[in-house]
Every structure is written in C-alpha cells, then in structure tokens.
Image (cartoon, rainbow, N blue to C red):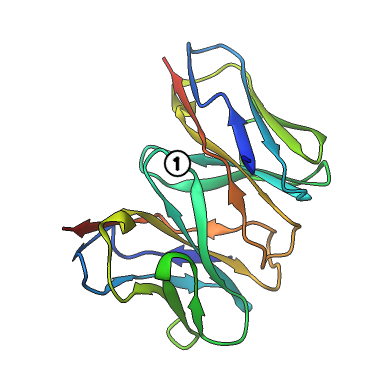
Amino acid sequence: DTAVSQTPKYLVTQMGNDKSIKCEQNLGHDTMYWYKQDSKKFLKIMFSYNNKELIINETVPNRFSPKSPDKAHLNLHINSLELGDSAVYFCASSPGTSGYNEQFFGPGTRLTVL
Amino acid sequence: AQSVAQPEDQVNVAEGNPLTVKCTYSVSGNPYLFWYVQYPNRGLQFLLKYITGDNLVKGSYGFEAEFNKSQTSFHLKKPSALVSDSALYFCAVRDSSGAGSYQLTFGKGTKLSVIP
C-alpha cells in the first residue's frame, strides 16, 4: 500500500499554462506539506496544512494555490507557469504539527516548463 | 531562526569502511534533529531522529547518529558501508520551542558514494 501518493509523476507543459498536482495519504495523518526541490537538490517548504487549515505559507508566488478538500488530500494548483517553476515537487505528511514527528514523503512530481 | 549546515557536498567511502556524513545546526531553543535519505528519482525516506534522551540514536539500515550539544552537531554514521547506501542524505532541524514556525529546515544534502 502506498502511504503518500502523488499524481502525475511527470508533468511537461508550456509556459503560461495552468496545472495541478494531486497528493493523497492513507496514513491517517493530520498534517500535510508541499516542498519544492530545485535542480541543485535544495529542498524548501512551500505550504503546510493541518486538518485542512493552512498553517505554513512560505514566500511563494500567489500563482501557487494549495487546496485541501479533506485531511487525506492536499493538491497544488499552479497558474501561469514560468520556466523557474521547473522542479520536483514533493508532498509529505506527518501525524501532527509537533516538531518531533517525522514526515513521510511521496515519490515526487517532476515538473518541466518549456 | 533555525538553520542546518552539511559542509560536504559529496562523501566517498570504500565498501566495508565506516562512513560519516556531517551535520551542524543552529536553533534558539533545543533542537529536534532528523536524517533522511533520498535514492535517485525517489522521495525522501526517514532514517532516524533525535528528540531527547540518549545522545546516540539508532535508525534504519544500520545507521546511527550522535547528538553533540556543545558542538551543535548531529553526524550520521555507519560502521560498515554498503554500495546500496549510495544516495543523497539530508539533515533537518526544527527548534523545539516552535520559534518562528512549524516547519523543518533541511540542509543542502550530501551525496554519499560507496565504492565497491
């Protein structure tokens, strides 16, 4: 059973398009995250939701909008895609917001903007 | 603000030899420290963590890490490296006081190559 799943695995699109990445976790966790990993493998938090409420919103362009329909899902919608959005996007989840809980990561979505 | 440094971009070690991947951190309170591993084209996998208590923490796949408060370090170690340990390793920290935010701060990663 896949604990944290993401779709699609690969996404190739043109500049200016709008795209979405979906994430689902079957671990019963309350908290979910989106991370961006750039070409140098640097990993940076973008958003975090706890029980469907936004708790972390780092300095991310407002073209990026997370949506959590329920606590098992956290989707990422990106408007007006730019070349610099090309990266691998990881979804993760944890049992709560307590800092001592490890996070469980999805397999990633490689976004390429042409 | 919290931060973590992994001073080595790459570590090469011969199979069967001990390995160390270095990590130092900075927090205003007490740290929660984590090690994650990323295999090519995969997500990050949790290896081990230090929350409190014994400074030597044991984790998955025979890895361990030692928390050193005076040196603000949390180096990852393994007594005998395997070729299959070759991967990208990330250290992460969060201030236990919750100062600033809820998120983990990750280091830039260290690529470990185990040579047969």
From the viewer's perspective, is B108 left or right of A109? Answer: left
Q: What residue do we see at 60% from left, 32% from top?
A: A6
**Above-or-below relation of A34 to B17:** above
* Depth check, front residue: B86 or B5: B86
* Depth check, front residue: B89 or A27: A27
Which chain does tag 1 point to?
A: B
Q: What residue do we see at 62% from left, 82% from top?
A: B52
User: Residue B3, percent across and down?
Assistant: 51, 64
| Quarter of the image where the C terminus of chain A is located | top left
**Can I make out residue B73 in this image?**
no
| Quarter of the image where the N terminus of chain A is located | top right
User: Residue B62, percent across and down?
Assistant: 41, 70
Q: Mark 1: which amino acid? A: Arg
Label 1, on which residue? Answer: B42
**Above-or-below relation of B38 to B64:** above
**Regarding mark 1 in the picture, which secondary structure is present there?**
loop
